[in-house]
Image (spheres, rainbow, N blue to C red):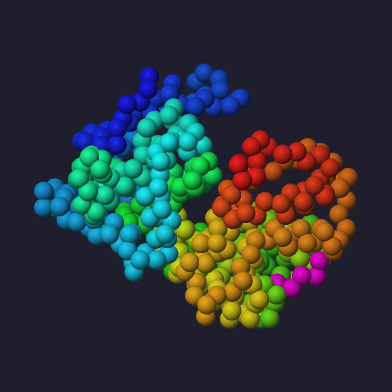
Amino acid sequence: MKDKTRVEDIGKKGRMVRLRLEDLMPLPPPYDKPGMEPEPTEPKEEWKDNYITDLDGYIGINVPVKKPETKEEEERMVKAFLEGLRKLFSRGDHWTFILPTLLTMDYCAKCNTCSDACNIYLASGKKEIYRPTYRVEVLRRIYKKYLKGKREFVSGKVDLNWETISKLAELSYRCTLCRRCEQWCPIGINNGLITREIRLLFAQEIGFANKELHELGSVQQLKVGSSTALTPEGFKDIVEFMEDEIEERTGKKIKIPVDEKGADFLLIHNAGEFLSWPENPEAFAILFEEADISYTLSSELVGYDAVNYGVWYDDMQLARVALKHTEIARKLDCDSIVVGECGHAHKAIAVVADRVVADETNIYRQSCMPILWDIVRKKKINFDPEKNDFPVTLHDPCNMVRLMGVVEPQRKVIRAICPQFREMEPHGVYN
């Protein structure tokens, strides 16, 4: 049955969507057998009092939310929302993304081509509220009606109340910000950006933010040193462990450079690698040692974690982390910053940070992929492709490939050392 939910329904009381297993996209084999996937459950009763559950019964903003108990409290909430919305469209308050925000508000043709590119919309069984255009159209109508003063026949119908505000906040966390929608849009409308700007509005003006992104993410990173809670002392201990493990497994005694001034670049890994997959930063250490590459890690607070969760929800947190990264690299007298494994960290420091890093704090920032290809291309290390003569494929990370444009270096590396490489479909920027 076709979902007949309308944009204006977001302002009505009660649940908007109830997900049923029969509506969802089936899982691929071998997980497609009857009974393997459980039915979606109803939210717990205690959740209804403390969280926003009236969108679809699930929680993205997983911090207690104070719901208005009086009309006056609701009006204050609406006023705060409108003040945040005004700032989104003010060059003085929102110079970082004002132009693409305005273009998306003004030029969407509402053709819904983007819907067929959205994995969440398709996987939900094509529920209207998950269309990339739905939440953006809600915001567009509020913007035109309450900020621009347009009549309803121009702006479209929408009520501005607690129901609309709370559901829009929760709906902004039903998007991965992969920007497949923008890739498919005939005119390049960036619905993913608007979704992120809705999160920013709620985080800065009303205090609604996902706990893992804010409290346990960027706040913890700036306070402790890493979103994983890894401290500088813990980082140094892990580096020593990595050196011992490299020697134990390869026989090579490698001293991993930490806080060395004058290196060509500061290498920043995702701190989760040190805790859960130390073999990955160990591999970088071995490759860079064998290729005689000049680099250093940093043990300074924030300097050993490339993660920047502000890119998902808050420009201020994004800027604080990005500026800390560039400050550390400049203090170590490095020529550039190189990001190791981490898709969103690539986007945050190498692309989005361009809008928040001023000239006096700027430094060249790049992906590790061209450096790895340079090692292979210039034969700085002699690799034996016959040792990798088995089927290999590549799953493109959207933040590095579609959002940053690093498409070919990693493919060239794999083609050179893996004879049986084959592409996934779709791949590259269409992943």
Q: Left of 18 or right of it: where is 145? A: left
Magenta span main SS: loop
Q: Can residue 88 be seen in this view?
A: yes
Residue 401 vertical position relative to residue 224 in the rendered view, above or below: above
Name above or below for residue 134 compared with residue 225.
above
Query: Observer-nearest residue: 183 or 272?
Result: 183
What's the residue at 24%, 54% (across, down)? Answer: 148
Magenta stretch?
A: 291-297
- Residue 295 magenta: yes
| Residue drawn where x is 41% and y is 41% of the image | 109
Residue 56 picture location, percent across and down: 33, 35
Does residue 111 appear left or right of residue 340 in this picture? left
Choose between 358 and 279: the one closer to the eye: 358
Report the residue at 70% width, 77% height from top: 263
Q: Can residue 248 be seen in this view?
A: no
Residue 427 vs residue 215, the one in the foreground:
427
Q: In this view, does 395 lie to the left or right of 391?
A: left
Residue 330, magenta (yes or no): no
The spot of residue 38 in percent (x, y) is 45, 26
Residue 391: image quadrant is top right
Query: Residue 137's spot in the image, x, y percent?
Result: 33, 43
Quadrant of the drawing holding the C terminus: top right
Q: The N terminus lies in which quarter of the figure?
A: top left
**Residue ID at (46%, 47%):** 189
In this image, 34 relative to 39: left or right?
right
Residue 195 x %, y %: 40, 49
Q: Using the image as rendered, state which of residue 95 and residue 107 is in the foreground.
A: 107
Callout count: 0
